[in-house]
């Protein structure tokens, strides 16, 4: 394998209620697995706000929300792992989740309560600013996919505790050849980490650079546990190149 491994879907216990691994531990695990970087995509949704936004102060919300990223970045700088900022949005309409890339702290602070829109409203307003990827679109219990509200989807979600139905996500992307097909471990606890990744041709140091490489399709998928989906993605690429 030539290139640099990045996991674009990880969580921290500092921010995500469902996270069981603290940021520094997550970073250290990815270093041990030979990764070059990861994206912190902690959950941002109305239920999170109901617990955190007790003073109706968005900057304080962001101070808490970014704590996992800041801790990850601090440890990453110490051990040489690139830590990028992303987010996993959920909107009030249902429990579907959306990974958002091409953002920074200023973007998050300048767009308060964006997770209180609908998925389509969010896409209509921000689609030319950020990259929106449907996380585990066919996980058991998910609502129907809002196909006009995303730029792509995870065809590999590596979380081992859910019925992710990755085959249906692959079929969705076959119906939408314009979609970006991505993969992420969805790391929350011990054993989740480093199950899948994207392979980038160069190291990246922020979410904007990551977004640019994805949009230029300068990446490949990697996953020893889901090799059939990696091979399917490569076959789609070869067919598109003819």
Image (cartoon, rainbow, N blue to C red):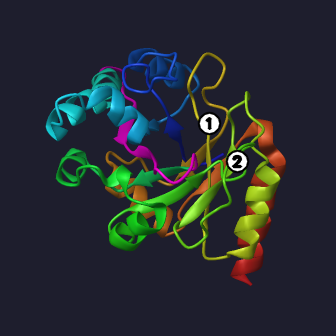
The quadrant in which the C terminus is found is bottom right
| Left or right: 84, with 140 as reference point | left
In the figure, 34 relative to 109: above or below?
Answer: above
Query: What residue is pinned by disc 1?
Result: 185
Label 1 to label 2: alpha-carbon separation: 8 Å
Pick the residue in front: 231 or 11.
11
| Left or right: 32, with 101 as reference point | right
| Left or right: 165, with 219 as reference point | right
- Return the mark for residue 62: none
- Return the mark for residue 156: 2
Report helix, strand or loop for mark 1.
Answer: loop
Report helix, strand or loop for mark 2.
Answer: strand
In the image, the segment drawn in magenta is: 78-96
| Left or right: 132, with 94 as reference point | left
Q: Residue at x 44, y 39 (%)?
A: 41
Q: Position of residue 104 (x, y in %)?
A: 26, 48
Cβ atoms at labels 1 and 2 below 8 Å apart: no
Q: Residue at x 39, y 64 (%)?
A: 122
């Amino acid at each position: 394998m030539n290139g640099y491994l990045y996991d674009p879907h990880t969580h921290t216990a500092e921010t995500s209620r469902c996270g069981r691994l603290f940021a520094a531990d997550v970073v250290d695990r990815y270093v041990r697995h030979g990764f070059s970087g990861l994206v912190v995509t902690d959950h941002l949704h109305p239920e999170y706000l109901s617990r955190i936004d007790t003073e109706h102060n968005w900057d304080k919300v962001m101070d808490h929300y970014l704590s996992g990223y800041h801790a990850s970045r601090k440890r990453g700088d110490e051990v040489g792992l690139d830590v990028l900022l992303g987010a996993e949005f959920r909107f009030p309409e249902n429990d579907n989740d959306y990974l958002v890339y091409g953002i920074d702290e200023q973007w998050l602070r300048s767009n308060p309560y964006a997770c209180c829109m609908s998925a389509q409203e969010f896409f209509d307003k921000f689609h030319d600013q950020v990259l929106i990827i449907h996380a585990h679109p066919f996980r058991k219990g998910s609502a129907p996919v809002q196909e006009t509200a995303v730029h792509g989807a995870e065809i590999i979600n590596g979380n081992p505790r859910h019925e992710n139905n990755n085959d249906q996500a692959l079929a969705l992307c076959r119906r939408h050849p314009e979609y970006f097909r991505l993969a992420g471990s969805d790391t929350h606890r011990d054993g989740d980490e480093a199950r899948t990744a994207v392979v980038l041709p160069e190291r990246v140091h922020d979410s904007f650079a990551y977004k640019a490489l994805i949009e230029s399709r300068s990446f490949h998928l990697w996953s020893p546990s889901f090799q059939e989906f990696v091979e399917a993605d490569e076959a789609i690429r070869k067919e598109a190149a003819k």
